[in-house]
Image (cartoon, coloured by chain):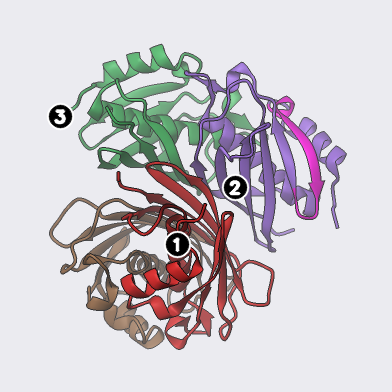
Chain colours: A green, B brown, C purple, D red
Amino acid sequence: MLKMDAAALQRFLSAEFLQVAEDFILEHVDMNGLTVRLNVDHRHLRPGGTVSGPSMFALADVAVYLAILSRIGPVALAVTTNCSIDFMRKPAADTDLICDVRLLKLGRALAVGDCLLFSEGDDRPVARASLTYSIPPA
Amino acid sequence: MLKMDAAALQRFLSAEFLQVAEDFILEHVDMNGLTVRLNVDHRHLRPGGTVSGPSMFALADVAVYLAILSRIGPVALAVTTNCSIDFMRKPAADTDLICDVRLLKLGRALAVGDCLLFSEGDDRPVARASLTYSIPPA
Amino acid sequence: MLKMDAAALQRFLSAEFLQVAEDFILEHVDMNGLTVRLNVDHRHLRPGGTVSGPSMFALADVAVYLAILSRIGPVALAVTTNCSIDFMRKPAADTDLICDVRLLKLGRALAVGDCLLFSEGDDRPVARASLTYSIPPA
Amino acid sequence: MLKMDAAALQRFLSAEFLQVAEDFILEHVDMNGLTVRLNVDHRHLRPGGTVSGPSMFALADVAVYLAILSRIGPVALAVTTNCSIDFMRKPAADTDLICDVRLLKLGRALAVGDCLLFSEGDDRPVARASLTYSIPPA
């Protein structure tokens, strides 16, 4: 069962991540995972007009975090312990990025999610990422 | 279009990887990816009766390799350049492992595939892996 | 032999990465690798007063990029294809981050570097990262 | 302080990992890390006469495990949760592999080590690996 729905997650983001909350829009959440959009803006771009690696990392990181919170609620202080990311294609510059997350493991101490990132409207993934979060004892 | 079907891939495995060919059975291949089974045997086990990490790595490695060959044919000398693997649950000891591969990128020089590994009959993944292969110029 | 020294790398950063150039200071470069400092500022912080994961990723990414350019010169359009990063300790909030890079491989098509990141003045690494860059044909 | 020296670690390996103990020789251990040798044998080879990826993975995995045990003693049931490995050069076929480990973090719940692997007598690394182990509560 979901502990936080899309509206609750978006409110959490606005309250806790003031600096970046406007970058990310929670599009959808269910028991299988969720979808987050990155509002691509000039500050996410690299020379040559492509979305920067750190912006893609940030999107995957926040998306897996929200997927965990959707299942355990807003109390946890989960922290990223590992990320592996493959950059596979050049994202379109003037197009939002869409990140689909699957939560593969939700244990007592560790959670693992993986993501595919797409330039909106193109079904070939621009990046793949997997992240581990450490969940502190309640 | 597939350049090698399941029978061709299994023959390739038998001819080129004599030492380990009997470990792996190609279950299914199509344009979306493929499924390989690891015949779990005592030599794949660790103390405590679980499939060893190197055996799971070997399964993911061969599965992505075969997924690439299914699309480019048996000529290439592709080599693994990177693997990231998350071990998420303890596999059952007396149960074959099933590895589902998606080929996420097949470029001229690099290919990326990701895998989920399952103990047969249990739909919670025991491991997740992503691999990059370097494909030499023709 | 180095193709770009510290001053040349810093000028390259200022010219090509206008948006982030002021964040990074090249401290040292030689044939074994280089050291880059992240000027930690409020925009790099997360709630709780720690440097954000994306800021650490960005530091590792730019540091390996500069290590490659120091050896092949400013002409190349190298792109990150893979990053694996382990976040091991909470960085101090009001302290610059120092990133030490070793270039482990510099091939014709692929380069691999690894990094340790430290909060200045503390010799326990806060993060470890390894990155692969694809180097396009000349 | 070390809880297990080289002789104790080698005995542990022989007792607990009967199947593979003869493959690995503990060369050196101190507070900074340790060195393990893989006795390269025909069963570690791939067609073309190179050491297989799974053999290199197994070497890195056992080496980080022993580095952790050297510091916390033989009681723990630590398990690998993540490995990222870069294969950078083709190892020599008739040459032992040497694996140097640094233990970067040894926390209550998680430990992180990284490795460089060399063909004996060549100082260019053939592979780089980083591994996370989960350490169960005492």
Secondary structure under tag 1 reads: helix
Residue linked to disc 2: C80
| Disc 2 crowd, CA 10 A, few/some/many (<14, 14-19, 20+) | many
Q: Name the residue located 33 percent from the left edge and 38 percent from the top edge.
A: A101
Q: Secondary structure at mark 3?
A: loop
Pick the front one: A134 or C135: A134
Give the residues drawn in magenta, as a range: C20-33
Same chain for the residues at labels 2 and 3, yes or no? no
Residue B25, given in percent of the width and then of the height, sits at: 25, 75
- Residue A4 position in % (x across, y down): 24, 21
Q: Amino acid at mark 1?
A: Leu
Does any portion of residue C16 appear in the rendered image? yes
Q: Nearer the viewer, mark 2 or mark 3?
A: 3
Say yes or no: labels 1 and 3 on the same chain.
Answer: no
Find residue A1 and name its label.
3
Q: Few, some or many C-alpha atoms within 10 Å of disc 1 (few <14, some 14-19, many ≥20)?
A: many
What numbered label is drawn on residue D66? 1
Residue at (32% x, 25% y) in the render: A76
Picture quadrant of residue B6: bottom left
Q: The numbered mark 1 sits on a residue in which chain?
A: D
Residue shown at 32%/70% (left/top)? Answer: D16
Q: Chain of mark 2?
A: C
Q: Which quarter of the picture shows residue A31?
A: top left
Distance from disc 1 to disc 3, alpha carbons, whole Å, reads: 41 Å
Q: Which chain is home to disc 3? A: A
Residues behind callouts 2 and 1 on a single chain: no
Label 2 to label 1: alpha-carbon separation: 33 Å
Q: How many marks?
A: 3
In this view, the residue farthest toward the left is B121
